[in-house]
């Protein structure tokens, strides 16, 4: 019997790449609000149950979330439904189907006061509603699901949809000067890397049935930079030289939601468990831009 993989949010940044990466494991179907079959809306619990029970996947991958960090401060109820309540239903349904549940977390569960890369065991203390609801979803899966993998990632970008990379390139066409925050530090992570590592981990745990315990793993590029440093490399690798960028502190760009200052993640656990090497963020960015240019 062919393995059935359900990707929730298959049209998103990570979900789009997951459809390619997970195709080697079995039949992949994207479940979302506009799917022709197996429609599923994370804000509507009944559709989660009906969509999964109809398709009956062996692997459930939740690549969808409420990610509008600032808007979440106003839309707290919706953010809670999608990021906190939906994972409860997903975990319950995964248990009923005896399925592996894969879920994605965020570096925004930390307060950013550390000066060393965060490990999976470090204390969490989100500063905003987005981070708080995502953390609650993680904790729900850890307490309910029998078989799961949670991947905590950071600063996700790709060559489609809405993200920092494409925003910078769009602004470069409209402006000659840009002010970019230089005191928030993290690891930009290509969605392709996330999808490929996910496929490797799922293959090891589910297909090969290796002795991989359920748990939470950091999954990000290695190395670190600021949003200003990220923007500099984007323009360098794309050959954009008509834009002057100025480094500014967070206080000069106030937002509704507070952001942690430092969210670099340690990849030691995932590298040792799955025998992986997480590439430097600059190498991944070069590959992503090369694909964008082609």
Image (cartoon, grey):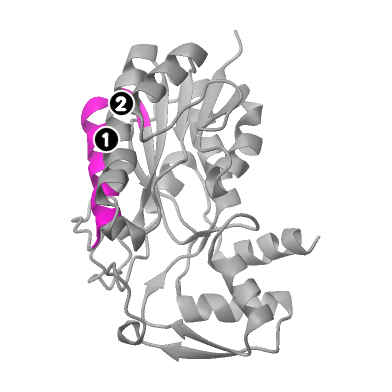
Name the foreground residue: 68 vs 4. Answer: 68
Q: Secondary structure at mark 1?
A: helix
Q: Secondary structure at mark 2?
A: helix
Q: Is residue 242 above or below residue 289?
A: below
Magenta residues, start to end: 128-148
In the displayed structure image, the side of residue 266 where residue 239 appears, left or right: right
Residue underneath mark 1: 85
The structure residue drawn at horizontal position 54% and vertical position 64%, both measured from the top left corner, is 280
Mark 1 vs mark 2, CA separation in Å: 7 Å
Labelled pair 1, 2 in contact (Cβ < 8 Å): yes
Farthest top residue? 1
Name the foreground residue: 74 vs 294. Answer: 74
Percent of width and height locating residue 227: 47, 76
Residue underneath mark 2: 89
Q: Is residue 166 above or below residue 139?
A: below
Report if residue 194 is visible in the image.
yes
Percent of width and height locating residue 204: 50, 29
Could you say which quadrant of the image residue 64 lies in?
top left
In the displayed structure image, the side of residue 222 where residue 69 appears, left or right: left
The structure residue drawn at horizontal position 22% and vertical position 71%, both measured from the top left corner, is 113
Name the foreground residue: 171 vs 108. Answer: 171
**Residue 151 lies in magenta, yes or no?**
no
For the C terminus, the quadrant is bottom right
For the N terminus, the quadrant is top right
Farthest front residue? 74
Percent of width and height locating residue 3: 57, 16
**Residue 147 lies in magenta, yes or no?**
yes
């Amino acid at each position: 019997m062919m393995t059935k993989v359900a990707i929730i949010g298959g049209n998103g940044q990570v979900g789009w790449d997951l459809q390619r990466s997970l195709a080697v494991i079995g039949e992949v179907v994207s479940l979302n609000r506009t799917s022709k079959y197996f429609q599923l809306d994370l804000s509507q619990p009944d559709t989660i149950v009906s969509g999964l029970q109809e398709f009956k996947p062996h692997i459930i991958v939740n690549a969808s979330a409420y990610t509008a960090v600032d808007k979440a401060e106003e839309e707290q109820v919706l953010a809670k439904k999608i990021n906190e309540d939906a994972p409860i239903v997903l975990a319950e349904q995964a248990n009923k189907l005896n399925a592996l549940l894969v879920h994605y977390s965020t570096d925004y569960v930390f307060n950013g006061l550390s000066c060393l890369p965060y490990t999976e065991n470090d204390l969490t203390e989100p500063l905003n509603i987005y981070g708080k609801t995502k953390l609650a979803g993680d904790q729900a899966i850890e307490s309910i699901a029998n078989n799961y993998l949670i991947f905590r990632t950071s600063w996700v970008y790709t060559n489609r949809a809405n993200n920092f990379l494409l925003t910078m390139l769009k602004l470069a066409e409209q402006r000659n000067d840009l002010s970019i925050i230089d005191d928030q530090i993290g690891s930009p992570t290509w969605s392709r890397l996330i999808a490929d590592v996910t496929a490797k981990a799922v293959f090891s745990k589910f297909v090969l049935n290796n002795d991989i315990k359920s748990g939470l793993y950091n999954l990000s590029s290695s190395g670190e930079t600021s949003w200003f440093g990220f923007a500099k490399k984007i323009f360098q690798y794309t050959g954009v030289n008509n834009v002057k960028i100025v480094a500014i502190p967070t206080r000069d760009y106030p937002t509704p939601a507070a952001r942690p200052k430092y969210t670099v993640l340690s990849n030691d656990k995932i590298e040792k468990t799955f025998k992986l090497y997480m590439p430097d963020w600059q190498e991944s960015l070069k590959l992503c831009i090369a694909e964008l240019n082609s």
